[in-house]
Image: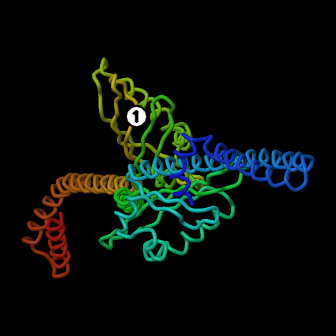
Amino acid sequence: MINYLSRMTPYFHTNRFALPAAAVSAFALSVIFLFSTFTSLHGSSIWYAVLLYLVFTFCLGVFLLRIAVNTVQSLVKSQAVIAKTEEKFRFMSDSVPNLVWMSDNLGLITFFNRRWTEYTGLDYEQSIVCPELIHEDERAEMHHQWYRAVAEKTPFDMEYRLRRVDGEYRWHLARALPLYDSSGAITNWFGSCTDIHDQKLKNQELKRVQIALELAQKATRVATWEIDTQTGVITHTPIIEMLFGFDAHIPQRHHEELLAVVHDDDREIVRQAMNSWIAMSRPENGGEENFRIEFRVVWPDQSIHWLSKVASNIRDESGRVAFLRGATFDITDIKTMQNAQQQLTIREEAARESSRLKSEFLAAMSHEIRTPINGVLGMTTFLLETELTAEQFEYADAVRRSGNALLTVI
């Protein structure tokens, strides 16, 4: 019907009075014939009545015919506009790199663009009967979310894998929005699928690395962070909570929140050291790049833990320090071992000093004791050479033996 109307459009447009003229000619012939017939049979009065009837009928016919012609012309023009609009839409949809599709108001797919056919290797008829195009892991969820969006008249947004013509499933971001008519009713849904496969794999790899980093940081008790020097806001990894004794994980904290749990004896030292380093890192002050400090923090259970902080500055285009980026790690065990080593060293030094003093004492005592003992032994030797009774000799000899034994000891 549309093709026939399209062929008739030029004739109706250039010969808009052709049909009325033909009708007038036919009417004139009919009037002549009827006039001749009725006047011969019934006289002129009948002829006037018939003539009026025919004039009325003719006018009504011309009016209705004109309406029909205008209606047909409007339909043809509307169809031409629709066809041109569809042509523009197809051109635009085929020009984008995305997979474009449309559905009716019930969610049934009615259109795929050329890029869809190139990607899947399937035309429209093949695509709508091929559920395997969507990966089985996301297929059921995709249908659930799609028809829920259609039912609730809300935008559709989901990531799932689509099968390429070579059989590879690639990740796509699918989005669809409803199209409304002038009355507010949904007429169609317009959707597209954007290939995000490479970015998805990069994100998955990044997430894997982040998880591995968090596990490594948790095992080694090391946290990484970055401080905005203008706001004092710290962006950090979750392990920072464990190091400073916080219960809840907050991705960003203010620098003063961390200083609040620093030991009272160390808090001002840390604050002044940080401020001094930021000042010294300015180019006009020498541009010091690195920073390191050790300090204590007090956990809610009042236990004391040692932390070490190392950092480097990040400059903006003007050379100003915009960020401080670094790491904080727990050195409590190291400090405990160092303290134990210091205590051991102190005890060893004390033992060596005690031994030295003992040796000096014994040396002094040996000298002081040997002198009189040598005199006693000499006199005992002379005594033994004199005439002594057996009992006297035994006593003197016992003194000599005891003296020699004492000299051996000292």
Residue 219 visible? The answer is: no
Q: Badge 1: few (under 14), some or many (20 or more) residues near its Cα, within 10 Å? A: many
Q: Viewed as shown, does residue 186 lie left or right of 248? A: right
Percent across and percent down for residue 181 are 67, 50
Helix, strand, or loop for circle 1? strand
Residue pictured at 32% horizontal, 73% vertical: 167
Q: Quadrant of the C terminus?
A: bottom left
User: Which sits in the foreground, 382 or 73?
Assistant: 73
Which residue is outermost to the bottom?
Answer: 390
Residue pictured at 44% horizontal, 37% vertical: 227
Q: Viewed as shown, does residue 367 lie left or right of 65? A: left
Q: Viewed as shown, does residue 253 lie left or right of 52? A: left
User: Which sits in the foreground, 83 or 318?
Assistant: 83
Q: Is residue 68 above or below residue 218?
A: above
How many labels sit on residues?
1
Residue pictured at 64% horizontal, 47% vertical: 22
Residue 211 visible? The answer is: yes
The residue that disc 1 covers is 323
At label 1, which amino acid type do we have? Phe
Residue pictured at 41% horizontal, 31% vertical: 273
Percent across and percent down for residue 204 are 39, 61
Percent across and percent down for residue 385 are 6, 71
